[in-house]
Structure formats: C-alpha cells, structure tokens
Amino acid sequence: MGRPNSALTKGNEAIPLLELTVDGLLARAVEKQGNDIALIVPHQNIRWSYADLALAVDHLAGSLLALGVKKGDRVALCSPSRYEWIVTQFATARVGLILVCINPAYRAAELEFALNKTRSKVLIIAPRFKTSDYII
C-alpha cells in the first residue's frame, strides 16, 4: 500500500490553527460579511444573512438560558434537515451546551430511551417527520 502522504496525516503545518470558538467564528462572519447570505433552506423559504442567522442564534441561546440550562447540560435535537439545525448548533455552542442529535425516525419508546440515556435537559423537536406527528 505504501506510505501515507505526510501532508494528509499531519495537515498543512504552514497554516496556523484558528484560535476561535464556533461562536467566535459566527461573530467574525457577522462583522466582516453581515449582509452576505449565510443560510438558504428552500423548503422552509429561508434565505438569511449572517446577521439574520446571528439574531436567531441570540434568540435561541437566550431561550435556552431562560429554561435554566447550564454549561455542560445536554440539549437533544430531533429533527430532519431544517434551519433549526444550524441555529441550534450555534446556540448550544454559544451557551456551552452539549448537542445530542436524535434520529427523527425514532418512535416514542426509542425517543424516550435516547433522552433518558443521554440525560438531556431540553428537547427541540420538529412538529412532524414523514408519518410521525410529534405535536399531539
């Protein structure tokens, strides 16, 4: 098989690592490209700039804190591909929460098991997925 390419195993050492958090990267993007398009989700009719995305992240991060979660707590997300995914990823990172991704195809018993196993404090869930209606 031969030797692995050292550039692949070590990375490009000439390019320094960024000393930024995920939240810091979003803040920098807002500062430098605030009006540029950051997120397009056609099936939800979403076309947001970085500033729009940051505003949604601010809102969700504040809502999570209002629920009483603390750094290191787990937040479960059970949803197909939607704009809420990216907002939740940034908001949980901002607050220092652990994002737990749960398969939206799970039935009630599987969802309950996953929530208990991960000790999630909050569940963010899509209203429906395929034949499942979660809002009853």
Image: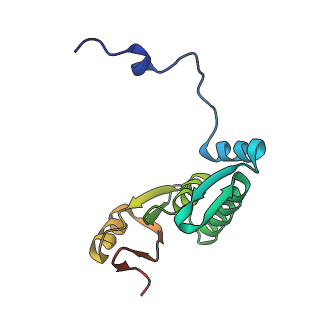
Above or below 32: residue 44: below
Which residue, as the protein is rendered here, is positioned at the far bottom? Answer: 136
What residue is drawn where x is 62% and y is 65%?
Answer: 60
As drawn, 104 above or below 9: below
Residue at the top extreme? Answer: 2
Is 109 or 55 nearer to us in this picture? 55
Q: Is residue 133 left or right of residue 32?
A: left
Relative image position of residue 84 (x, y in whole percent): 54, 64
Q: Quadrant of residue 104?
A: bottom left
Depth order, front residue of 15/100: 15
Q: Residue 82: x percent and y percent?
A: 50, 63
Residue 48 as seen in the image, left or right of residue 8: right
Horizontally, is 102 left or right of 14 in the view? left
* Extreme-left residue of the structure: 1
Residue at x 47%, y 21% (from the top left corner): 11
User: Residue 80 location, x and y as percent?
Assistant: 42, 64
Quadrant placement of the C terminus: bottom left
Identify the residue shown where x is 61% and y is 63%. Answer: 46
Q: How many marks?
A: 0
